[in-house]
Image: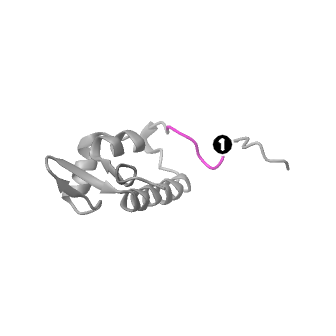
Amino acid sequence: MSTASDEWFTLPQIAEMLGVNPSTVRHWVNTGRLSAEKRGRRWLVEREDLETIMAQRRRRAGRSALIEPSTESGEQRKGLSMADSIDLGTDT
C-alpha cells in the first residue's frame, strides 16, 4: 500500500533523480512540459507525470545515440558512437 508522500515528488527531488539542475525542472513546469501542482509554497509532481517525462528522456537519449554529430573543422567528438565497441555481457 502506498502513501500520499510516495505518489508526489518535489522539483528538487526530481532534479536529483534525473541528474539535472532544479532550474531545468522548474522550466519544464513553467512551459507545460511537466505537470505540477502548487501546494503551499511547493510544486509537487505526481508519480505518473514523472514517469512520463522519464520515458520521454529515455526515448530521446536512445535516438541521439543513433546519430553521430559531425566533426567538421577539427572538432573532437565526445561520448560513444555506434562504431565504439561495448560489451554488454551478452553471450554471442
Q: Looking at the image, which residue sits at the far front?
A: 1
Residue 21: image quadrant is top left
Q: Is residue 79 above or below residue 62?
A: above
The amino acid sitting under disc 1 is: Asp
- Residue drawn 35% across the image and 49% down it: 5
Residue neighbourhood size for the residue with mark 1, other residues' Cα within 10 Å, grouped as few (<14), some (14–19), many (≥20): few
Tag count = 1
Residue 34 drawn in magenta: no
Residue 85: image quadrant is top right
Residue numbers of the magenta segment: 78-83
As rendered, which of 72 and 48 lies closer to the eye? 48
Q: Please, what secondary structure does the residue beneath circle 1 have? A: loop
Horizontal and vertical percent position of residue 23: 23, 43
- Residue drawn 49% across the image and 53% down it: 61
Classify residue 12 as left or right of residue 76.
left
Q: Specify the principal SS of the magenta part.
A: loop
Classify residue 26 as left or right of residue 67.
left
Horizontal and vertical percent position of residue 51: 43, 58
Horizontal and vertical percent position of residue 29: 23, 56
Q: Looking at the image, which residue sits at the far left?
A: 41
Horizontal and vertical percent position of residue 35: 27, 62
Q: Which colouring convention does the figure follow?
A: one colour
- Residue drawn 45% across the image and 45% down it: 72
Q: Looking at the image, which residue sits at the far right?
A: 92
- Residue drawn 66% across the image and 47% down it: 83
As rendered, which of 72 and 83 lies closer to the eye? 83
> Mark 1 — residue?
84
Classify residue 56 as left or right of residue 29.
right
As rendered, which of 63 and 84 lies closer to the eye? 63
As rendered, which of 83 and 73 lies closer to the eye? 83
